[in-house]
Amino acid sequence: DPQKFWAQIAENDFHWEEKWTDVLSYNFDHRDGPIYTRWFDGGKTNICYNCVDRHIQNGNGEKVAFYWEGNDVNEAQQWTYNQLHTEVCRLATVLQDELGVK
């Protein structure tokens, strides 16, 4: 049961500010209206919190969040959650202050 599987993952592995009403809703028949697929309809979460902030709060700020490797094999970096958080905050400031994103 894919819906049960994804519901369990979502409940156990992600923070939700508002829980969803339906794991999956869809319409694949254009005679019944617009074609759509919605996952976790009605749910509200914060992707930055789930991907970055909660790892720092759990004491993992200095652990590697991801490895980056360029086209040249000698071009590689590793980013900690703290470094990633700093860059996310910088981008958020630009989006808010210079582009008016709320």
Image: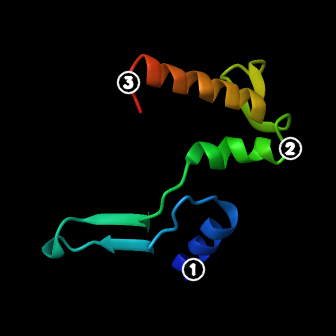
| Residue drawn at the location 65% of the way across and 22% of the way down | 71
Q: Classify 10 Å Cα crowding around label 1: few (below 14), some (14-19), many (20 and above).
A: few
Mark 3–mark 1 distance (CA, rounded to whole Å): 39 Å
Q: Classify 10 Å Cα crowding around label 3: few (below 14), some (14-19), many (20 and above).
A: few
Q: Badge 1 is on which residue?
A: 4
Mark 1–mark 2 distance (CA, rounded to whole Å): 31 Å
Residue type, numbered disc 1: Lys
Q: Badge 3 is on which residue?
A: 100
- Residue 59, labelled with which disc? 2
Closer to the chain start, of discs 3 and 1, is: 1
Residue type, numbered disc 2: Gly
Q: Position of residue 1 (x, y in %)?
A: 55, 83
Q: Secondary structure at mark 2?
A: loop
Q: Classify 10 Å Cα crowding around label 2: few (below 14), some (14-19), many (20 and above).
A: few
Q: Is residue 1 left or right of residue 54?
A: left
Check the picture and name the quadrant holding the C terminus: top left
> Between 7 and 57, which is closer to the camera in this rendering?
57
Closer to the chain start, of discs 1 and 2, is: 1
